[in-house]
Image (spheres, coloured by chain):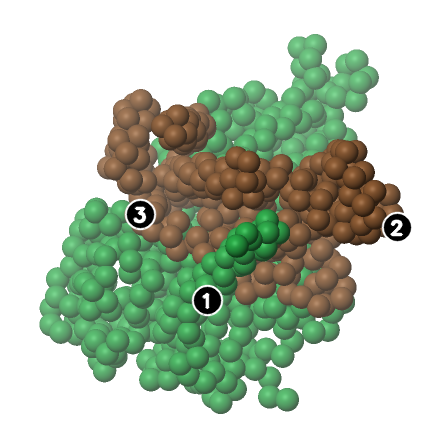
Amino acid sequence: MRISPVVRVCLLVSLFVAISCSSRVQSAPSEQTFVAHHPIVYGLTLQPSTFDPQIGSSSELGIPLRSVYDTLVYRDPTTKQFVPGLATSWSISPDGLTYTFALRQGVKFHDGTPFNAQAVAANLDRITNPMNASQKAVFLLGPYTGYKIVDDYTIQLQLSAPYSPLLDSLSQVYLGIASPTALSQYSVERYQFHQVGTGPFEMLEYVPGDHLTIRRNFDYAWGPSFYTPSTPDSVDEITFKFYDTDESARATALENKDVDIVGELLPVDARSLTANSDVELLPTVIPGQPLQFMMNTKRFPTNTLAVRQALIYGTNRDAIIDAVFQRFSPVAWGPLSSATEFYSQDVVNSYAFDPQKAKSLLASAGYTDTNNDGYVDFGGANLEVNVITPNWGEIPEVVQLLQDQWRDIGIKLDIDPVPSATILNQHVQQGQYNLVAWYDFGLDPAFLNRYFLSNGASNWTGYSDANLDAELNQAAASTDDNARASLYNQVQRTIMEQALILPIRDYVNLNGSRSDLDGLSYDAYGWFPLLNNLKVKSS
Amino acid sequence: MIGKVVTTLAVIWLAATLAFFALHILPGDAIQGELLGSGASADEIAQRRAALGLDAPVLVQYENYLLGLLRGDLGVSLLNGQPVTEVIGEQLAPTVALAVTALLVATILGLGLGTLAALDIYGSRSARLVLDVALSAPIYWTGTLAIYIFAVRLNWLPSSGSTNLVLPAGVLGFSAAGGIGQVVRANVRETLAFDFVRTARAKGLSEARVIARHVLRASLLPAVTVIALQAGFLLGGVVITESLFIRPGIGRVLLNATLKQDYPVVQGIVVLGAVVYTLLNATADVAYRLLDPRV
């Protein structure tokens, strides 16, 4: 019998279809093991390379995992005070080198393992094991040297030098406490798929690139003071999906009810969503460094204070925030965003937009427009500054506006675009820049040391001042909040008096949620939702 | 036969080598990118890189990489230590589903529109126009348009997610249909001029029967090769399509790994692409034999 070619093609094609269908069945695991009452979908905006908080460094991993783990201490989102978590109380030795934690009793991990000092020790061992190559947690521990188990519910952490940010570190998800049973059961590469904590949600499954699902832990009874008890309206299952590649797809997904919550909306999308009553916006200021331009004090012409000050006076931040950020961001006035601990009001309104003052500062420094081409001159050439411009965070759009605004005060701006932090670092190392755009996150201002100590790893301003160094070092070592507040106040003032940076705006995460949800709020670090408190509105 | 095997291996080696050197020309790597903002000192970053062999001279790294390839070892991700074969294995199914469905759409659309465009009947001009659009419009444009029309405006289909195959496969298939349709159209036109077609018509066969029994059969053969070539095009298309429609799969992994400079993952996927591409060409050869009794 001869089979006609058309039939053969059809056979081939149906074979392909059969293969594709069978593979689709395989890729959809059975999830219907329990009845969920209030499941929601949360859109993530990045795919972390690992969801293991002790190994990875991504902020995004904390959005689901912050609620899977508890930490020894928590920070109250409103007062920013440390409150008990898995540790009920703690004390710091007078020399600042020993932290003693009294641990909560009766706490069980999701797999039934009891929580105790040995569990904390197992976690510290894992984080500090060089073989595990922790990308963030190990660095958060600072000058940590080891622990001592005093009894089953008391553990001491030892340091080689005083380090006031330790409690802040211990309250972050990266130092969340995982079940020692699960840690020993899975390799360091596989544990991210089988994470077990003590938190208000337990991890169900993670399918890379597709979703991560967590389910409420109804045995949870040891939450921090700001966690509300669960009720029948509480959200009990959350599926996280990835909206990482196409930023405008986030708003579409929210409008189409594909997601219930999503962060990092584009400012223009958020602006148009304000007209949609089914969607609520929750713009959240992230503590840390505002978007800012660090000015190189080692290179002409930003080596002159008057020029640096003129650049700040010549910048209309309100116009930038209107145009680029759709008015969703507060103006930044100093090196700390307004949600950061020890943020000082003293710098507010310093260098408010004043182009005339900018021009007179330039004139007083000897720069005037001698050939009437609109730009002020120096030695027969236009006065130029260049800006290392990362391609993320709307920075290129901001720099475009700066170019226009600074033309008005007679300064020419050259743009040096960089596509990654690595290449930014390279261009900085070469030293041929006047300004570099940057922002970073953190609640404790000890991160300023990195940028403003004379020998700081990222001292991109090149500024070197023994007084500033002493203040920064004292503030990072002190455990006295009042002393720290006054030291950081002085630090912020010095940085602005010396015009080391041009701050633009506080970083704002533009979160949106469906209006039928209630209780969405974010923790002290700004990125991490308090999923425990999420409820559906009873209709 | 031996020649074929040698060519295949050479293609795979070339792809692997190109991928390796293209990535290593770029400054920086995954470790630097990930650790720069996490408080690690320059010394600590250097130690991490050394532990992964990233401080070795490029040629030594290249040699280790090729030796690994020979053993079937694609290495491990620099960022989470997961074996690359495992990363690919986890993400293969949704990509295969997308690519195969898209190829099916492309084949049906390409054959149908190509044939229609070759004739001179009602709808032929429109078919030509549609094929031109399919051939020249980039996927991100047709894809965005499709999302806007079908997901946002009409709300018929979800714009994202792993379960929905209709929109992404439709967009990707439409794009690939352009190439297939152009070839089919040219072949059909060519075949129409042959004597045996005139003979068939002279026998008094209906036009439909002439086309279906005689013309299409003769024009189908070259189309098989072009369908296989379009399957190669689809491999590139999935990267954009998966990102646009937020589907899991190899394309998304490739994009993320490239942005994070996770070399072993990128190299592994490029090698996989080369293997699939050469296998598809071999399949086309076999299909050719099946369809044409003369070969």
Please name the residue that numbered disc 2 is placed on. B122
Q: State the residue in front, B166 or A250.
A: B166
Report the number of numbered marks. Answer: 3
Amino acid type assigned to the residue bearing label 3 in the image: Pro
Above-or-below relation of B136 to A164: above
Please name the residue that numbered disc 3 is placed on. B83
B112 on left or right of A78? right
The answer to whether the residues at label 1 and label 3 have Cβ atoms under 8 Å apart is no
Secondary structure under the numbered disc 3 in the rendered image: loop
Query: Which chain is disc 2 placed on?
Result: B
Which chain did the renderer colour brown?
B
For chain A, give the colour: green
Query: Which chain is disc 1 placed on?
Result: A
Amino acid type assigned to the residue bearing label 2 in the image: Tyr
Q: Residue at left 51%, top 78%? A: A39
**Tag 3: Cα neighbours inside 10 Å, few (<14), some, or many (≥20)?**
some
Residue that sits furthest to the top in the current view: A380
Query: Which chain is disc 3 placed on?
Result: B
Secondary structure under the numbered disc 2 in the rendered image: loop
Above-or-below relation of A42 to A482: below
Marker disc for residue A25: 1
Amino acid type assigned to the residue bearing label 1 in the image: Val
Secondary structure under the numbered disc 1 in the rendered image: helix
